[in-house]
Image (tube, rainbow, N blue to C red):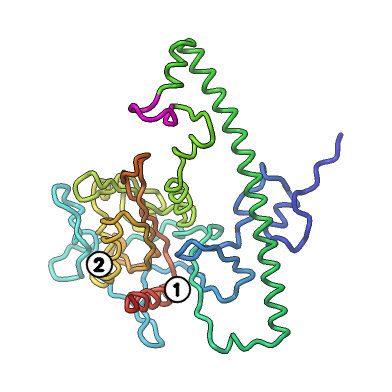
Amino acid sequence: MADPPPPMFSAPGDLSQGAQAAVAQRGNPSTLNLDDIFGDVMFTPDGDTVFLSEDQEALASGEKTVTTMASRAQGDKFVPVNRGGGLYTTQLTQREKPSLTMGSVGDGVQQTTSVPYQKAPQASHHVQYVAKKKSRSGDRKMSEQQKVERRERNREHAKRSRIRKKFLLESLQQSVALLKEENEKLRDSIREHLGNDKADQLLNSSAGGEAPDAALIASSQGAANKVLDDPDFSFIKALQTAQQNFVVTDPSLPDNPIVYASQGFLNLTGYSLDQILGRNCRFLQGPETDPKAVERIRSAIEQGNDLSVCLLNYRVDGTTFWNQFFIAALRDASGNITNFVGVQCKVSDQYAASVTKQQDEDEDAE
């Protein structure tokens, strides 16, 4: 029996400990899990990658324990945010009426049963958002030894980045090869069931009278890129970054309602699918949600722009959480907006305090 192929990575310090263990056990792109390689990677709200093992100036968004009530920074203390009025203040129980932002607790408001998290909103191995801490002026006054150490860390960071990119490229190359095989099987199946004449007519036809590049099966990489273009890539990246807590809305329908919600979103917010389908997602807002953040979201939707913003949101029972929210427009081949995707990432009070402060400073500067 031939010896097994050597692992694709051999330098012991190139990857995190978890990644090194996975490489030693499985060791090739077809069997390694991306989480093995990218387990110590996080994203900033702007989409930049951060390797937490190398960058100690990053403020992670994760929580050590899952909290069910958010707190707001007041001076050097954190004060719990007041609970919202719950489901019955949103009109989601009345299908003939539009959804409302959640109201406050008050007399005559029917109480909503407390809904615990079924599981942590983000799995521990999923990448999360981070914010860069502002560097202090003292950091610039480094000794020569500190400068040498920083350069060494930067070189190590670059080496790890190259290895991860190499792994991802080889994985994608294998995926492309498999997709080509499936494409050929699909062509053969069509010919077998329709005959050569009808099959040629179908395979070479254009969708809706468009250019030949819009044929049923793309004949070239350029044609495929026109179908799987940058907005789709951004969409997939956003979903991966946001731990699969997301909704898709349809702006062609009245009030831009939700037409799809992931199970992660339902777990995060406590709502059931029948309560939110066909309703605008403003019910996530409440009495202490920052109106400026809401206005930024509304403006992004009107202009069709991507946006990342941190704001306070409310769950079905009135409990609160800080949400690093990302919204992106999905477009068709003609550039027209067909849907919006909104992804949610529950973040810690400390992270929210840092990011919302930066948001306020940026807005004042503008």
- Residue behind mark 2: 286
Residue 50 at what x, y percent from top left?
57, 66
Quadrant showing the N terminus: top right
Relative to 124, 70 lies left or right: left
Amino acid type, callout 2 = Gly
Residue 204 at what x, y percent from top left?
45, 21
Relative to 78, 14 lies left or right: right
Relative height, residue 1 to residue 318 (above, below) = above
The residue shown at (51%, 73%) is 132
Spatial CA distance of label 1 from label 2 is 20 Å
Viewer-proximal residue among 72 and 338: 338
Estimate how packed mark 1 is, as few (under 14), some (14 to 19) or many (20 or more) residues with alpha carbons within 10 Å: many
Q: Is residue 323 magenta?
A: no
Res 351 label? 1
**Eye-nearest disc, 1 or 2:** 1
Q: Is residue 208 magenta?
A: yes
Span shown in magenta? 206-215
Residue 14 at what x, y percent from top left?
72, 61
Please, what secondary structure does the residue beneath circle 2 have?
Answer: loop
Quadrant showing the C terminus: bottom left
Relative height, residue 83 to residue 186 (above, below) = below
Relative to 128, 111 lies left or right: left
Quarter of the image where one finds residue 36:
bottom right
The residue shown at (43%, 77%) is 354
Residue 15 at what x, y percent from top left?
70, 60
Please, what secondary structure does the residue beneath circle 1 have?
Answer: helix
Relative to 281, 68 lies left or right: right
